[in-house]
Amino acid sequence: MRESLLDVAGKKIFVAETGDGPPLLLLHGGGPGASGVSNYGRDIAALAEKYRVVVPDLPGYGRSTEGMDAAEPFGYLADHIRGAMDELGLERAASGPMSSNPAARRRPTHRKGRPTLTRESVGRAALDFLDHHGPAELTMRSLAADLGVSPRALYNYVEDRRDLLTVAAELFESEWRPPELESGSWRESLRSYCRALRAHYRSHPGMTTLALTENITTARHPAMLRNVDALIGFFESAGLSLQDAYRACMETIRLVAGFVELQDIVYDRPPAHVNPTDLAQLPPPWLRPKGPEDSEGSGSSNASEGSKGSEPVGDLPHLTRLGELEPDSPDTLFAFSLDILVEGIAARAARPGE
């Protein structure tokens, strides 16, 4: 028989387990000297032939921490047994009633000050985790630590990390509520749509790239399918053929997602190696020749010669002249990108059949 001492809301709950199969939770009564194994000792072996038998010592009994909330004993017991089940990765288990009081069997909505786990809440937690950490930092163990539960508790709701990311991606897509598209004023309507889509992608930076790198197909979510279908219909009503309407739809999504993942993310979540002051320079440092301060041990004093062992840069008249201009904000750059998109679609709609 396997034995463990679980930490639930600061209390120790002793649990004995044996057997495989559907979980069966055996809850003992409250008489003097009562405990799980002592009360069910004659039945456990037979039950273990068909079930995963889980036998806890209730709070205040056996090897569990002494004491309970005398003002609400049934709720206290139910809360701690539910917490033990979470630690064991059990969403539900068959059991005999410990009490006829419904409060003793009702799943609490919160434990340890946090909502109890569900598949959706675990996916939501992963989405929130990614807002503050890099994708590589998201593991079952790190998310469990963030939620204050054991890693195995999460496996009751998601199969693995990939399934966890799938749930997070589906939540991300289901939250998108696009503005209404109006074909009568399609240019401004498209601009409003793109601005709203950009704001949605920026609300969870990196999610789109992560879904691609992890090969998570978010487009199958019903909300995403409806949104794509509506956008294709919008472009068709603006004068494009069905094939061009589909192309315009995909180009719209690529433009917005690409802008957020390549441009906005540098401002919203600057990488450790990027100095924020560099973002306000034109051209940015990565579009300038390396100077002596950038060369490691080369001793070169001529920036046009490049780094030691590299090809000479030569003259860069156009990049040099950019230094005389004011840098664009991300919003200005995005507006420019929308102008190109809108005017390109308008030009295409004026040439039907090509």
Image (cartoon, helix red, strand yellow):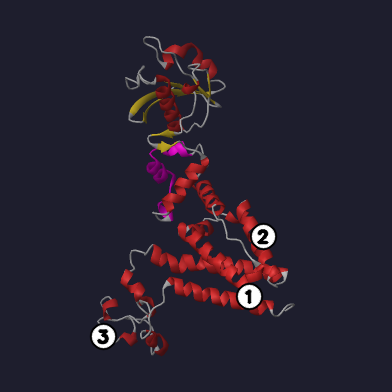
Q: Mostly what secondary structure, the magenta segment?
A: helix
Residue 246 vertical position relative to residue 308 in the rendered view, above or below:
above
Q: Nearer the viewer, mark 3 or mark 2?
A: 2
Query: Residue at coordinates 34% horizontally, 83% vertically from top-left?
Result: 306
Residue 95 vertical position relative to residue 126 in the rendered view, above or below:
above
**Label 1 environment density (alpha carbons within 10 Å; few <14, some 14–19, many ≥20):** some
Q: Secondary structure at mark 1?
A: helix
Could you say where residue 82 lies in the image, as x and y percent from the top left?
45, 28
Mark 2: amino acid = Asp
Mark 1: amino acid = Ile
With 234 as the anchor, is 307 left or right in this view? left
Q: Classify the position of the N terminus by image quarter.
A: top left
Residue named by callout 1 = 345
**Label 3 environment density (alpha carbons within 10 Å; few <14, some 14–19, many ≥20):** few
Q: Secondary structure at mark 2?
A: helix
| Residues tagged 3 and 1 counted as in contact (Cβ below 8 A) | no
Residue named by callout 2 = 229
Could you say where residue 38 lies in the image, as x and y percent from the top left?
42, 12
Q: Nearer the viewer, mark 3 or mark 1?
A: 1
Range shown magenta: 135-154
Residue 9 vertical position relative to residue 122 in the rendered view, above or below:
above
Residue lying at the far top of the rendered structure: 32
Residue lying at the far front of the rendered structure: 184
